[in-house]
Every structure is written in C-alpha cells, then in structure tokens.
Image (tube, rainbow, N blue to C red):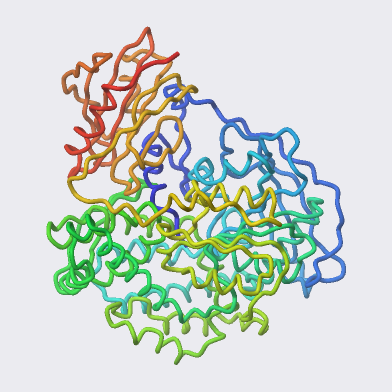
Amino acid sequence: MHLRFALLIVALLMSACTVPSSSNPTPTLAPGAEELLGAPTATPAPAPTTAPGATAAPTAAPAQSAARYEKARCEFPPPGGVSVECGWLTVPENRATLDNGREVRLHVAIFRSTRPDPPSDPIVYLEGGPGVDALERLPLVFDIWFRPFLANRDFIMFDQRGTGYSTPSLACPELTKLSFDVLPMDIRAAESSRLWQKAALMCRERLVAEGIDLAQYNTLTNAADLEDLRLALGYEQWNLIGSSYGTRLALTAMREYPQGIRSVVLDSTRPPQINESQTPADAERAFQTLFRGCAADPECNAAYPDLERVFYDLVAKLNTQPVTLPGVDPFTGRTYQVLINGDTMISTLFQAMYSTEIIPLLPRAIYDAAQKNIFDLWVRLIMNNVSQSDYFSYGVMYSARCYDEILFETREAMVKADEPFPHQQDVFDMASFWDICDAWGVGVAPPVENQPVRSDIPALILAGTYDPATPPDDGKEAATTLRNGFFFEFPSSGHGVVLDGGCPLSMTLAFLDNPQRQPDAACMAQLGAPAFDVEGAAVRMIPFRDTDQGIAGVIPQGWTNFGRGVYGRPSGDVAIVQALTPVSALEVLVGLSRQFNLDSEPEAAGEYVGERYTWQLYTATIRGQPTDIALAEVGGRALLVLMISDPGNRDEFYEQVFLPVLDALRVIS
C-alpha cells in the first residue's frame, strides 16, 4: 500500500487551488481555477450500455453466474480530455450460496483509447494492496500514470470488492484514526503493534456486525470478479497489468481463467509461493542496497560517508531523544505534531524506498537529520504514509492476506523472521501480524494458493533493484514457471516500475503490441544507479515548450510534470507553476487568494526586471509554506509564476529556479 510520494506535490500545490470534498478528500480544481489557468473544463462522457457477450460463469463460480453489469455515472471527477464510461458490476458476495441475497457491487471505469480503431483487447489495471482504492484517487494519478496507455488501447480500472467506491466498504476508520492519534506519541514498535492490533480487531467486530462475510474478500474471489467483468463486458480476451498485490491477482487469474487473457504485465511481483515472513529480510536487503549504492557513488560517498553507521546511530539517538515537529496533511491542510523516534525512522525509510523519485534524496536526508537536525523530508514522508489511509481498505488487506498468505506459516516462524535483524528494532513485528490473522476468522486458502503459478500466457515481469517490498528475486522466481515470461530489472527503481514512465513504460507498450516477442531493451543501456542528491549541486534548467498554453521557457531537469505547467521536485518540498492566463495581471492578483487557498493576501515584494518582461513580485504562504509569486502583463493577459517551497530551502530555489524561470519564460502565441 503506497501512494507514490511525488503525488503529494499535486495535493499540496494543485490542492492549493482545490476544495476538498466532505469525506475522503479527492482534490479537484476549485470553481474558477480552470478559467484562471486557462485549463479546459472536463465534461463527463456518457455512461456505457452493457456490451453484449457471453454470460457463462467462471470455472470457480456456480454453473449459472449471477453477475450483472449496469451503466452508471462515474463516482469520481473524470479526467479532462478523455472519454470515460462507468458502471457497476454486481456479483454475489458468496458464490457458493447464491440464495442468501447479499451482493457486492464493484465500480468500473472504461477509458476509451485515443486511437480511432483500437484493438479489441483492452488493458485492465489491477490495483495493489490488497486494499488500495483504484478509482477514488484517480484524479491525482491519471495523467501521470495511466493516460499514456490510451494511445493504443482502451484502459479499464475498477475498485476491487471492499475497496474505494465499491460496496460494501471494508475500510477501517478505526485504524486511520489511530494513525493520526499516535503521531505525537513517543511509543516503541511493540506498543504500536499492540494498539494497532486492538484497533484492527475493533474494525473486524464492526464489519462482522454489519453482516459482511470477511472470508469472501480474497484473491480467489477477486479473480472470479475479474472474469465476471470480462464476460459481462463481452470481451473475448484482454491484457492484464498488475502492480504489487495486483500481480498476485493477475497470476491467480492466469491459473483460474486463462482463456480470457491475451498477455500479462507483472510489475513488482509477489508470487503466491513467497511467504510473508520474508518481509524483514526484504527490508534489510533494500537498506543494504541503499547504503552500498551510496558508497559506490564517488560523489555520494564523499558527501555522506559511512551511511549505514550514521543512520543506525541516528536511530539509537532518536529512541532516547525523539524530536517533535509540525506536519501538514496535504489533503486537508490540517497541521499535526509529529514525533520521530528511531523506530519511526526505520519504518519511514522502508516506505520511502517504494518511490523511485525519493530514493536519490535519502542519503542527504539521513545526514541532514543526523548532523543538522533537519527532518523536513521525514516529516513529509510520515504525513504521506498516514494521509494515504483515506485511499486504503484495511479490512480487505487483512481478509485477503490472512487467507492467502499469513496463516500458511506458524507464529513461531513469524517470530524467528525478525531475529536475524536486530537493527530493525522489531519494527515489522511479524508475530503481531499473525495474531491479527488468527483472530480475523477467515480460514486458510487451498494449498494451491501457496504454490507457483505455471502458465504459457505471455508475461512481462518488471522489478526495481531498490524495491523494499517485492525484490527482484521475487520476480525472477515467478518467471521460472512462466514459459513465455520476460524478466527485466531496473537498477535505480523502487516499487511500481512501469509507473515511473520512460524506459519501463516504452517496453511495456511494445510488449502489449506484440506479447509473443521479447521487447527491445535497448533503452536500459542508458539506465544506471540512482543519481543521488548531493548538497550544493546546482539545479540544471532545461528548455520546455508548451504549445497548448502558448508559452516557452525553462524547467528544472528531473522534476515531475503534473500537467499544465506544474512541475514538482520529487522530494515534494518544492513546486513551480508557469502559466499564461486569459485575464489581466490585476485580475489574477485579485483572484489569487481564492484560487490558490493562500493563507493571507499576497504582499508586494518589489519588481524584477527580467530578460523580456518586468515582473511584479509578491510573497504569501500556502498551508504555512513560503510562496513566491510573479506576474507580468502581456497584451491584456498575464504570465503567472508561482513557487511553493519549504522554509529551509526557499532561498536556494529562489536563486536557482524561480529567477531563471522569470528570465526565460515567454509567450509564443
């Protein structure tokens, strides 16, 4: 379960021009923001009619399927510039007892390809977790992660049973509340596990009291739902892309329903034969990969020598002298006091290594914390880990993982899993996980769910060297029983390789076009170890040209493009907007507080005479973060540049990014 950290820059900057919904906030542009930035307004496409097709039941389901599909409006704000059709798949909660009347409804979205005549076999994305909401967080991630797939095929997403918009919901607000409640508390891993177990079982009691059969929320039932969806929509075959837990679901579908699958992409693979007790060893492998990776990089090693010792000395110090700092929930704007002790540092480092964008920043962040008492990145990571609870169903996680994985092992094996790694301070506490599963009451899956999947279906298996949760060896092991499988390891990647774009994405698209042939891996020759961030290194500015907005200028190399002139540093601590607005500079200034949720009215800060324009400068804050604003009048329209940063790095990026942007930005149409 990991909401990629770089997305927080969208939540902070774009939600700076957003209004949260009343529950489970999903940022959308505030009224009028489209006009200010000149963005098109998204119009929901009409919902689909049910496609004709067979109604035969999946092999693991009753002979007569009770599944049905109905068109409906999309529950999420549709992304702009795409045609999306939504609906509900209704299936029995328990396929073995169709007469009990209880049903499960899954929310489905079909994004139409931009190609005039796309192939008849669409792509289906299988979300991770288990328990991550696929559609509820879609406005944050669609443009970055999923839009490229529309170039050649329709793209289908759905909330698996118990997650997101699907009903019933197996979300556990008890655990979300606990995550926020313990932020200011100085508690060690053992006490944290005890509190977590208590809250998890409270959630279980509530779900059972609501009549939910927790034993029906697992990978076998998810695979049957997936097959029911294919049949209901009338597709002869489709292509699966599974990420993290989605790879286990894809592998199960390959075993149970191979007739409907043309090809499979397994991204960050967790095959069923891998046991949960491997987690502490996986964490240690990832930590050593980071420490050795920095040591092997001359610049990183010179700036941050003996990184492993420095990190664990910091852990030991924080367990006796924790620090408390303010942290902001990027989705709500609420400020919390965040206490960081050594156990928190270990668990946060583990989560941070999911993100390819964050990995290069970690050596410097460790040294900043150890030597300068600067914890900005760590606080942001902690708030990310907590705030993403709104996009996760813990009830599904425990129902599926307890049934599929945990109870195949003994409690003794779980206890021993922690013993070889004393540096981890029992942070992962595998025995506590087993205890929750023992009480969860869903039983144990058939033995086949702990065995390798054998298949002839073409499969592309992708892995990241730095992945802390699904290491490359897991992907290699899955590939050994996939006769037409192609395995690739990406040397600087974390978890969720294809979502990084670039080389993994281009190879994936090539594979989907011709899954019988190994994709050309020539682009991998350009890849290497992470480009570790070293203090004092200059930001390189590179040219950009945005014909849609009618502007050109420069952007920082390596920053993530979040659409329409918005670029964010992967660490989430700096972002910049460049836009040509359809209104005058005065009108923009008047509307800034409303459109960007500024904490107060902008204050004049003089002017800057750039190479082309004279800019009027203003300062403000957004959720306590320093915000620099520049406006230039160009023929009745206004150029807007806005940079939001951390207090500790504002001056550095003002000189290296903000002013060069003002010098280079120009109107081209």
* Residue 246 in view: no
Farthest residue in the bottom direction?
412
Asked whether, in this view, residue 497 is left or right of residue 443, the answer is left
Image spot of residue 223 (x, y percent): 69, 66
The one nearer the camera, 316 or 168, is 316
Picture quadrant where residue 541 is located: top left
Could you say which is closer to the camera, residue 350 or residue 98?
A: 350
Does residue 242 appear anywhere in the picture?
yes
**Whether residue 285 is situated above or below residue 39 in the rendered picture:** below
Specify the quadrant of the image occupied by residue 98.
bottom right
Instruction: Classify residue 466 as left or right of residue 157.
Output: left
Residue 119, horizontal then vertical, whole percent: 75, 43
Residue at x 66%, y 74% (from the top left corner): 453
**Residue lying at 54% horizontally and 53% vertically, measured from the top left:** 521
Q: Position of residue 112 (x, y in %)?
A: 68, 39
Q: Nearer the viewer, residue 636 or 202?
A: 636
Task: Give the camera-side residue of 531 and 526.
Answer: 526
Numbered circles on residues, count: 0
Q: Is residue 296 above or below residue 579?
A: below
- Quarter assignment of residue 97: bottom right
Image quarter (top left, top right, bottom left or bottom right) of the C terminus = top left
Q: Is residue 409 above or below residue 124?
A: below
What residue sits 78% from the left and 50% below the top?
233
Task: Give how far across and how far down residue 377 sits, in percent.
Answer: 27, 54
Q: Is residue 85 left or right of residue 327?
A: right
Give the side of residue 553 with respect to residue 501, left or right: left
